[in-house]
Amino acid sequence: MPTPKLNITCRIEEVPAIGGFLINSLSTDLADFTAFSPAYNALYVTNAQTALTAVTALIQPKTLTGELKVITLRMSTNMSLLPPKIDFLEGYIKRVPSGLTVAVKDFAISAIRKANNNGDVEALVSALNFTLALVNNPTNKPLILAQGYTPTQNTALTNISTELAADNIAQNAKENERNNLVTSNYGVINDFWKTLTDISDAGKRIYRNSNKKDDYTIAVLKRRIRQEELKNKMIGTVTSGGSPVNGAKISMKPVLAGRRRSTTSKASGKYELKSLAAVDWIVTVSADGMVTQNVAVTIVTGQALTRDFVLVAV
């Protein structure tokens, strides 16, 4: 059976918020709605609220999001561990006077750095595996070990690559599970949207000559939601040893799909990231000579989240 088309006129993540606004307004103005039609009664409100809860659970599945948060946080931590390890490996390779099977540049360390900086896990795992295969080549490995590279360092890089590969598969599986959950329930979302448009239509008729009409106009509600999103931000200060850290990088990646955001701290240690989607994020804070921090945060619509970070020296 073909998947039904999604019949909504907003972004899917906005459906619960629009539904909440309309159902709350209906509850407040129920007497006027009942006077308009007896179909609008306490049972109608209860059914609408029940449907809102169900649709919110589909679009914002708490269990799946929580599982994705754990996976993404672990991936971010492993990616944060890579730069110094790769720098050392590159240094050892460059110290080999001769005898390597390929030129130093062909070990493709730059590809690892690029993929890591871009947050491209699949490309990162591929690049790591390529480089490690060359490092572990029977001809190359003794030469690199002779320059100070250790089996322990090699094992650490191999473990990171293995864990990133496993977590990337797990992350994709969870994201597919979430997408399939939504797609397979388009009919439920469409039915809920019919209820919302019904409330909207009646509300606009009842309050045709009143400012309250805006409370039932979906286009107006969409604008309100998007204007509120502009207020969503994370602010704070990055310090180390009681002193502000200038130039620390603060990077934010949505747990679910979305655009990565980043900024740097000022001389005062203060930073600010604006207009953030009201979702769960993984935040990475890094600075030269400091241990990178990775934390999970949740941005709430219309609010500023204050989060300070204290970095420690490597």
Image (cartoon, rainbow, N blue to C red):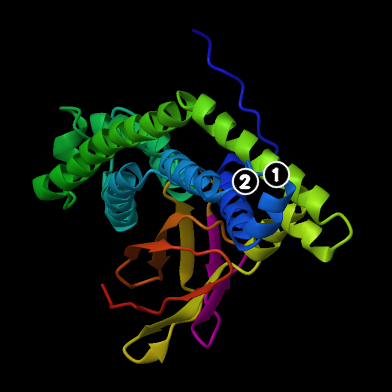
Residue 181 falls within the magenta-colored stretch: no
Residue for point 56% across, 74% down: 272
Bounds of the magenta span?
261-275
Q: Nearer the viewer, residue 307 or 243?
A: 307
- Depicted 182 relative to depicted 290: above or below: above
Name the secondary structure under disc 1.
loop
**Which residue, given by chain and number where applicable, does mark 2 sit on?**
40
Q: Tell me, yes or no, whether the two marked residues, 1 and 2, touch with CB atoms within 8 Å.
A: yes
Q: Residue at x 33, y 72 (%)?
A: 290
Within-10-Å neighbours for mark 2: few <14, some 14–19, many 20+ = some
Q: CA distance from mark 1 to mark 2?
A: 6 Å
Helix, strand or loop at disc 2? Answer: loop
Q: Amino acid at mark 2?
A: Tyr
Residue behind mark 1: 37
Q: Indicate left or right for 223 with 165 as reference.
A: right
Q: Position of residue 34 (x, y in %)?
A: 66, 51
Q: Residue at x 49, y 7 (%)?
A: 1
Residue at the far bottom in the pictured view? 242
Task: Report the residue at 22% width, 40% height from top.
Answer: 163
Residue 100 sits in quarter: top left
Q: Mark 1 belongs to which amino acid?
A: Ser
Position in image of residue 21 (x %, y %): 61, 56
Depth order, front residue of 284/202: 202
Can you name the residue that lies furthest to the right here? 209
Image position of 187 (left or right of 242):
right
Question: For mark 1, does the 10 Å Cα neighbourhood hold few (<14), some (14 to 19), or many (20 or more) residues?
Answer: few
